[in-house]
Image: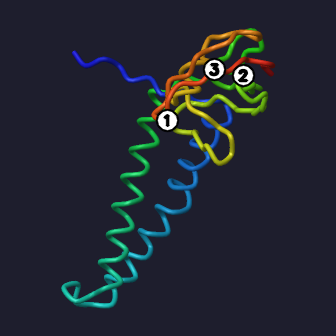
Amino acid sequence: MKKEEKIFLTPEGFLALEEELSDLKENQRPKVIQDIKEARALGDLSENAEYDTAKNEQARIEARIKEIEYKLEHSVVQEGSKDSVSIGSTVTIKYVDDDEEEVYKMVGSLEADPFDNKISNESPIGNAIFGKKVGDQIDVESPNGSYKIEIVKIA
């Protein structure tokens, strides 16, 4: 028996997936069905680029719907804790070597965006600080070597 996959999401990430699914089902799916009908009306389907484009778009939409439904079905939604680092927590860390501070939002891997300081619980820093408390000093192993950080604040 296959182990059940868990997909960690913040409430915002879950809502964003629900909204995308709704848009796909209520807006994009009916539009592409109409596009296919109009392309069929043009005649010969063997040389009909509009028909081919619409069918490819329909396949893309249906695949995305299935993907989102799977993710929503297997998701675990978590609110951030202020006691220890968890999915949804906003964490201020300090790099011990240079006293530089960074603020990260801990999210599941689907929502990770390092350019927006959203780190996954699967990233080197995220994995190291997950479950830790304010004041904890942690050694982080990364592809560029190890370094020490301290958790300054959890919000």
As displayed, is residue 152 above or below residue 113? above
Residue that appears at 70% across and 9% down: 136
Camera-nearest residue between 147 and 126: 147
Q: Quadrant of residue 36?
A: bottom left
Question: Does label 3 or label 2 sit earlier along the sequence?
Answer: 2
Camera-nearest residue between 155 and 18: 155
Camera-nearest residue between 24 and 154: 154
In the picture, measured across the screen, residue 42 lies left or right of residue 140, that is left
Residue that appears at 65% across and 11% down: 132
- Amino acid under disc 1: Asn
Q: Where is residue 155 drawn, in percent x and y?
A: 80, 22
Q: Which mark is residue 148?
A: 3
- Amino acid under disc 2: Val
Q: Pointer 2: what residue?
A: 96
Q: Pointer 1: what residue?
A: 144
Mark 3 vs mark 2, CA separation in Å: 6 Å
Q: Quadrant of residue 48?
A: bottom left
Residue that appears at 44% across and 23% down: 6
Mark 3 vs mark 1, CA separation in Å: 13 Å
- Amino acid under disc 3: Lys
- Is the Cβ of the residue at disc 3 closer than 8 Å to that at disc 2? yes
Label 2 crowd bin: few (<14), some (14–19), many (20+), radius 10 Å:
some
Q: Where is residue 61 drawn, in percent x and y?
A: 42, 58
As displayed, is residue 20 above or below residue 18? below
In the picture, measured across the screen, residue 77 lies left or right of residue 144, that is right
Q: Where is residue 109 drawn, in percent x and y?
A: 51, 34
Mark 1 vs mark 2, CA separation in Å: 16 Å
Q: Where is residue 30 drawn, in percent x and y?
A: 48, 64
